[in-house]
Image: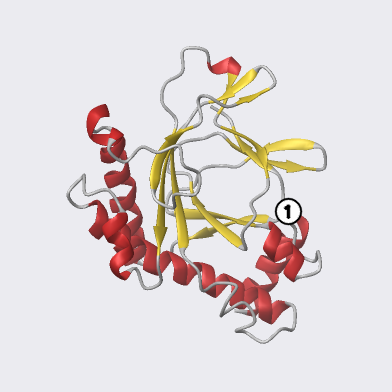
Amino acid sequence: RDEVRRAVLDAGKELGFFQRWSTTASLRRAIRDMEAVCAEFFRLPAEEKAAFYSEDTDKPNRLFSSTTYELGDEKYWRDCLRLACGSPVGDTKNNWPDKPKKLREVVEKFVEPTRGVGMELLRLLCEGMGLRPDYFEGDLTGGDVIINVNHYPPCPAPGLTLGLPPHCDRNLITLLLQSTVPGLQVSYKGDWINVESVPNAFVVNFGHLLEIATNGVLKSIEHRAMT
């Protein structure tokens, strides 16, 4: 545990990004099921997905598109399914799409252990910085877990698009599943570094809240998604 704690803390100080492999068979199965059901959602007919579409940015559960947004001469090219998940999930799943049939069940089985991974990483960081292990528990982590499922449809002019523009996350910690899709890049010393897609591994990055809470010891690093 000491070695893992040092590795996580060092990565947080240097890069603000690292990868955490899923060590349990149950979590790997939950990841596979989550990837499959989300892919099935985006294959639904447009009229079925349209029932969940909204451009209201205050709506916690919605499907939306970024193809109308621009950065200079480049357009953002993605669709995104956003789901707010209580802890425990409870009745919040009733606000999620009811198609595909298994989506609600699969997401619930995915979000609980995934939140556990995030909380364990925060406890490791606390130990490494000499804080009490439950320092980040309570109000800082008591809100909803937000799941963003990004879908990058085929683009007729990929040289003119970005999946996601350069940005930093605003939250405490983000766990990202790349699946088999390349394109994630991290800013490091003035260059953009490609992040390799590793099966059953979360890419972990820190947000502004964690940088503020640690007085800048841990960094919120700019990253982007290329199509």
Residue 128 spot, x, y in % from top left = 71, 78
Q: Residue at x 70, y 21 (%)?
A: 72
Q: Where residue 9 appears, x then y in whole percent?
A: 71, 68
Looking at the image, residue 209 sits to the left or right of residue 42; the answer is right
Q: List the residue tagged with mark 1.
A: 15
Q: Position of residue 221 (x, y in %)?
A: 72, 50
Looking at the figure, which quarter contains the N terminus?
bottom right
Which x, y percent locates residue 59? Answer: 44, 49
**Image height of 79 relative to 120, above or below:** above
Residue 18, picture quadrant: bottom right
Q: Is residue 122 left or right of residue 144?
A: right
Residue at 48% over, 68% down: 117
Could you tell me which residue is drawn at 30 percent across and 33 percent down?
Answer: 50
In the picture as drawn, the residue positioned furthest to the bottom comes out as 132
- Is residue 45 visible from the viewing direction of this image? no
On screen, residue 26 versus residue 126, left or right, reads left
**Residue pictured at 27% horizontal, 48% vertical:** 97
Residue 29 falls in image quadrant: bottom left
Front residue of 200 and 85: 85
Q: Is residue 39 above or below residue 202?
A: above
* Residue 74 visible: yes
Location of residue 101 with respect to 190 vertically, above or below = below
Which residue is most to the top? 156
Q: Nearer the viewer, residue 200 or 49?
A: 49
Mark 1 closeness class: few <14, some 14–19, many ≥20 residues within 10 Å: some
Q: Amino acid at mark 1?
A: Leu
